[in-house]
Amino acid sequence: METLVWIGAAITLAGFAGILYTLFSLVRLKRAGLDDSALRDRMSRLLPVNLGALLASVLGLMLVVMGLLLR
């Protein structure tokens, strides 16, 4: 079950990296000084990336907890 914990930790870190990517991308977009419609358009493209990263981090944490409980 130790491998389950490490796999879950790796998936969680990948999800966290995706969340950081979307965060820094949004900050960069805000600083670009785009008009409202262009900003909304580009932000809507980042939404699936953010949701996928959040899902990956949650699933990874679930694997870590499951691995710890099954010890």
Image: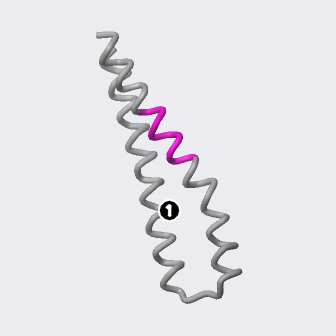
Circle 1 residues within 10 Å: few <14, some 14–19, many ≥20: many
Position of residue 26 in the picture relative to residue 1 (left or right): right
Q: Amino acid at mark 1?
A: Thr
Task: Tell me the colour scheme of the image.
Answer: one colour
Is residue 66 positioned above or below 55 on the image? above
List x then y, in percent, for residue 35.
65, 87
Instruction: Say which residue appears at 35% left-offset and 23% top-offset.
Output: 65
- For this orientation, the residue located farthest to the front is 36
Reply above or below: 57 against 7: below
Residue at image coords 66%, 74%: 40
Q: How many numbered discs sit on the rendered protein?
A: 1
Magenta stretch holds residue 55: yes
Give the quadrant of the C terminus.
top left
Q: Is residue 48 above or below residue 38?
A: above
Q: What residue is rendered at 42% in x and 25% in y?
A: 63
Q: Is 47 a magenta residue?
A: no
The stretch in magenta equals 52-60
Q: Secondary structure at mark 1?
A: helix
* Residue 49 appears left or right of 7: right
Q: Position of residue 21 (x, y in %)?
A: 46, 61
| Image quadrant containing the N terminus | top left
Q: Main secondary structure of the magenta part?
A: helix
Q: Which residue carries the number 1 mark?
A: 22
Residue that sits furthest to the top in the current view? 71
> What residue is at 61 percent from the left and 58 percent from the top?
47
Q: Position of residue 49 (x, y in %)?
A: 58, 54
